[in-house]
Structure formats: structure tokens, C-alpha cells
Image (cartoon, rainbow, N blue to C red):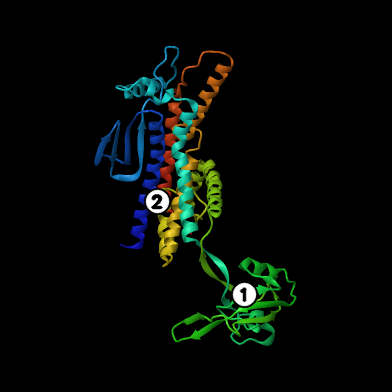
Amino acid sequence: MTVAILTIIIVIVGITLSVTLHEAGHTFTAKAFGVPVSEFMVGFGPTLFSKKIGETEYGFKPILLGGYSKILGMFPPTNPNWKDKGPFRNIIKDVRTESANSMEGYDSKRAFYWLSTPKKVLVMAGGTLTNLLLGFIFFALAFCTIGAYQPSTTLQSVAQCLDDSVQCSENVVAPAAQAGLKKGDEIIELDGQKITSWNQITNIVTNSNGKDLEIVYKVFDQDQSANNVKITRIETQSGSIRKAVVKPVLNNGRYIIGVTSQAVRQPGSLFDAAQITWQAFIGTVSMVVTLPYQTYKAIESIFTHEKRGGNTVLSLVGVGQIAVDQTTATNDNLSRIASLLSLLGSLNIALFVLNLIPLLPLDGGHVVNSLYEGTKRAIARIRGKKRPAPSDLSRSMPLAYFVYGLLIFCGVALILVDILNPIKL
């Protein structure tokens, strides 16, 4: 199986897992509060297999791009005091009727709309908070267990000439080469400071103003062979630690000594994973807020042939393209795994942010309605009034259908864009 095909399979499974766990967050919090859940399905399309356990039918469908759960009693039944008018009155009535019919055979007091405000918020936020947690977990797996390549204090290369000449004249020999440093040597002290990171080295050299710097470095034996360079570390002994003086030179506006760092894989901390999660959240918020405009610009790029950069909105097709590009660009399996984990982390943060939008049918719309309903109840309680009836959320369904249609349009449009004008990293 090729790397590209395996990557696509992993991405599909990851997306399915993420959406399924999102629905599980809704399902099991609802069941914990006594609300009946009639269906919990993985995938879409005709049911391949299902089994009823208790009140819930659990099953699998062939299109593995998500899943859904059916929580009963989402909308209150028709109230005689509600006057339905306008072109959408039949839609509103149908929504109420369907919700009431779904509760047949169940105690009506178990319907979702009877829950207290905190419980409603927990049920509707349970899914999106699951995605937030999954995003952090994926980032933690990528950066805390596998890690990312970071510059080390070991030298990857030592320039012989500052002007890239084959034969160096005395005035263009790189300072590090003059000091005797070679590939594989490790800088352990510079200008009297113990060195623990590459940033220390660059800061000291950049701010040196060209003054002499004492450098202490650990020597590595370099055994030249016909095919490659084999580097073996010498055990600590007389002569393995050397001292020298380097004089940084000004090159293209900054002081250098002519060395580059050897990148090594270093695992990060949970704090690093939290920072990456936060950065992904901020970046996704800015993208989602401008989703219609971003979609318009993406569609426009088809006709203008404008190259799409990395900071652009994508469909699942585009996500798959990036995943394949990243995994086929390297032979390092750990880097491939880290890239896929990071991608799945970003997808879960995107699901988290998207569902925060305070519009139905998204989770944020249900949360806002629950908070509005809770506020009305609190005011009535303070004023000594009778508890108000549940909010008539069904009246928001025309708007919900519009938002749902807009999301479908954006999704389909972005799929076409990603096919006709794929992103180039």
C-alpha cells in the first residue's frame, strides 16, 4: 500500500473518529441526564449493521465521514398562545410535530427541552468540548511523544569561505573554520556562558559587535569514507575538549562565525501542546469569522489562477491533499506520523470553533438559546413570577435551514476549488 493511499485512509478514519466522538459527547451527557437518545450512528447512508442496546440503536453506515445521534424532544410542542404567522409557519409546525412524535412511548418529562439550563448547556457543549480535548490530545501526541526537529548545539556544517569560494584567501576564511571547528563538534561554552540552546549561540554572536569570543567545544572524530561521512563521538579524554577564539564578521548586515546547527528531534512539554492548541484556536477563529469571504476568494482563484497559499480555507479534499503532500515529502516515518497527528489536531480545533458559532443548527446556537431561556427563568424567579414555558426554538428553524444550506454551499464550493485549483505549499 502506497504512502498516499495509507495517508488518505488515516485521514478518513481520523475525521470519522473525531465527528463520532463529538456526537458521543452529546449522546452520553444527554443519557446521563435521562434524555432518550434513539440513534447513534457512525457514518452516513444506508445502515450496514446496527444493534439496539437499551433505548438506543447503535450502528454503522458506509460513508465514513462522520456520524450523528438523535436526541429526542429537542423542541417543545405547540402552545395555544403561540401565534404562527409568515411564510415559514408550516415548517415551524412540522418541526414541533416531529419532535412531539419522537417522544411517543417515553415520559414527556424526559424530553430535552425540559432540562435545566446548565444541563442543556452541558449536553450541547459536550460535543464541541470533546473536539477541543481531542485537538489537545493529538497535538500532545505529536509534540510531546514524537517531538519536532529543533536546532541543537551540535554543528551541521562549518563554512570554509565566507564568499563560497573553493580556495579561500586569508581574509575570507570563516571564523569558525579558523578556530578549527568541524562538522559534528558540539559548542558547550561561548563568551563565558554555558550553552544549552542554539538561540544562545546566535544571540551572543549577533550582539558581539565583532569582538573576540572564547569558544569551548567538544570534538567529534570525522572518518571520511568513499560513500559518506561517519561521525563517531570520542569519549571524554585529554584533547576531546578544545578552546579557541573566534572573531565574528559582519555579513549581510549581521555578525556570523560561519556555522549551522544540526537539527535533532526533541519532544516538547504539555505546556507546549497547550500553546500550539491555543495558536490553532486563534488562527481558526480568524478563518471561520471570515468564512464567506474566504470562500469567495477561493472561488475567485479558479478564474484568476491565483496561487493559493497555506493560510487559506480548505475542504476535506484540500485537507487530504495537504496530508498526502506532507507524508510523501519525507522518508522519516516519525515525521509522517507527527504531521498526521498535527493535522487531526487542527481539524478538531476547527470543529470546536465552527460549532461555537451562535447560530442553529450548530451547537453554539443551542447553547445561546439555553442561556437565553435560563436568563428568562432567573428573572421570573427574582420577580416571583411563574416559571416561563420553554423557549420556542422551532421558530429559529428557518434561519437554521439557511445556515445549514450556506455551510453546504461553502463545503461543495471549496471541494471544487481544491480540485480545480489545489493548494501549493
How many labels were placed on the picture? Answer: 2
Secondary structure of the residue carrying tag 1 is: strand
User: Horizontal and vertical percent for residue 330?
Assistant: 43, 66
Query: Which residue: 49% across, 52% down?
Result: 304
Q: What residue is shown with label 1?
A: 187
Q: What residue is shown with label 2?
A: 317
Identify which amino acid the numbered label 1 is placed on.
Ile
User: Horizontal and vertical percent for residue 361?
Assistant: 44, 32
Residue 409, quarter of the rendered image: top left
Query: Which residue: 44% across, 19% down?
Result: 86
User: Horizontal and vertical percent for residue 83?
Assistant: 45, 14
Query: Which residue: 33% across, 37% down?
Result: 40
Name the quadrant of the N terminus.
Answer: bottom left
Q: Is residue 302 visible?
A: no
Tell me if 2 is positioned left or right of 157 in this view: left
User: Horizontal and vertical percent for residue 388?
Assistant: 50, 16
Secondary structure of the residue carrying tag 2 is: helix
Q: Is residue 423 above or below residue 361?
A: below
